[in-house]
Image: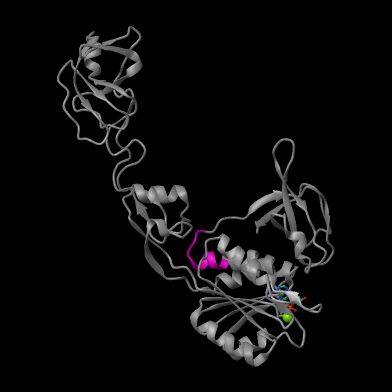
Amino acid sequence: MLITPRLAEEAINSRLTCLPIESLPLTQCIGGTLRENIYAERDQPPFDRVTMDGIAVDSESLRRGVRRFRIQATQPAGSPAIRLTRDDAIEVMTGAILPLDSDCVVPIEQYQVEDGIASLKSTAVSTPYHNVHRRGSDSRQGTLLLKTGRLLRAPEIAVAASAGMARVRVSSQPAIMIVSTGDELVEPGDPIAEYQVRRSNAYAVSAALRTRGFGRVGDDHVPDDEHLLHERLALHLTTHEVVILSGGVSMGRFDLVPKVLAQLGVQQIFHNIAQRPGKPMWFGIGPQGQSVFGLPGNPVSTLVCLIRYVIPAIAEAMGTCRTAPERLALAAPVTFQPPLTYFLPVAVEHDDWGRPWATPRPPNGSGDFLSLAGTDGFVELPPGPNTYPKGFVTSMYRW
Ligand code: AMP
Ligand code: MG
């Protein structure tokens, strides 16, 4: 019995070791996973904040009919509050603290100034806290602003900065090693014979990881030689938390990866998933808790398995809050007979109303990676229906 993609995912997630925490300056945390709660340092706004350029007055003066105010002083942004004299006004700037004993701001358009006296236009009205962003009206000191597990993008970085955090605690980046295998593979730039192919998978895997902000990514290539594979994997396992292999996990006589990993004490958790492409995928846990992913070498399979299993697993090990996959509807019917989950490459296209649809872009088999260029990712079609109608809504994974 083959396991399903969902069970494969659970089998991986339940065996991951959570990555350690480190404290980094804010600018180095972009794209990282927060591993502490962040609370508001102060009320927000931290003081009664003037929201218009104008004059601060006491609304009580206006209520008693005062329409002409001596401008007593100026209160710019970034200086301590000065105290208003009764029935006077203080010139204020947007962002300034509201002067003491004033309670509202008359905007600059609503008065004229002559000889230091502001005369209100007839239309000028004011009530308490008019044009004032009141202290604590957005949030209170001590409020939980960001929960552990949050991904740190621009808005979250701004919140952390506003809370006065120069450094935050985030998950360490895992050291990841990509190992491609195969005697037929040749580096781009090197001379190539008819019977050889370019080593494109390692580049695809590295690109997908780096796009997602993983920076500690190494890369190696090993021929189909048991001794060499043993030696190199032994080394990589001592220095990396995640090892991603491409190729060598199928049924061929030179598919040596599972055998060598077993020799190295990597415990197999599963081999083969009920899916196409990528059925021969292998997963195991190394003696020090390393995650070892054996991805099938066919380029479409490699990339699909990486995106569907490996990247979510790394996010899980970093303590990142899980997010449900994007859902999209098929733009055209799809037929698929085998009792397997079908990962179908798609392009996201918008109709005349701007609604997104997943337009199928089936490759010419799992070796046809050229057809993936220009697609956006793939959808997951669960086994069961032989035909998935137009409008069938399912999970979408982006490259
Ligand atoms: P394997 O999983 O090793 O049996 O490989 C399956 C197919 O994928 C073969 O046609 C390989 O030549 C091809 N392949 C394996 N690794 C790579 C790679 N790194 N880049 C491009 N093609 C590959
Ligand atoms: Mg091979």
Res 90 quadrant in image: top left
Query: In the image shown, does 303 or 147 lie closer to the viewer?
Result: 303
Residue 295 percent location from the top left of the image: 67, 74
Residue 120 percent location from the top left of the image: 29, 10
Res 324 quadrant in image: bottom right
Q: How is the image coloured?
A: one colour
- The quarter of the picture where the C terminus appears is bottom right
Residue located at (68% from left, 71% from top): 201
- The quarter of the picture where the N terminus appears is bottom right
Residue found farthest to the bottom: 227
Q: Is residue 13 magenta?
A: no
Query: In the image shown, does 331 or 211 lie closer to the viewer?
Result: 211
Q: Which residues are magenta?
A: 313-321
- Say if 389 sits above or below 54 in the image: below
- Say if 380 sits above or below 244 in the image: above
Total residue callouts? 0
Q: Is residue 318 magenta?
A: yes
Residue 275 percent location from the top left of the image: 74, 68
- Say if 63 sits above or below 285 in the image: above
Residue located at (77% from left, 60% from top): 371
Residue located at (53% from left, 78% from top): 290
Q: Quadrant of ligand 1?
A: bottom right
Residue located at (55% from left, 87% from top): 234
- Say if 372 sits above or below 108 in the image: below
Query: In the image shown, does 396 or 237 lie closer to the viewer?
Result: 237
- Residue 67 visible in the picture: yes
Residue 160 percent location from the top left of the image: 37, 51
Q: Left or right of 316: which side holds 253?
A: right
Q: Left or right of 21: which side holds 12?
A: right
- Residue 381 visible in the picture: no
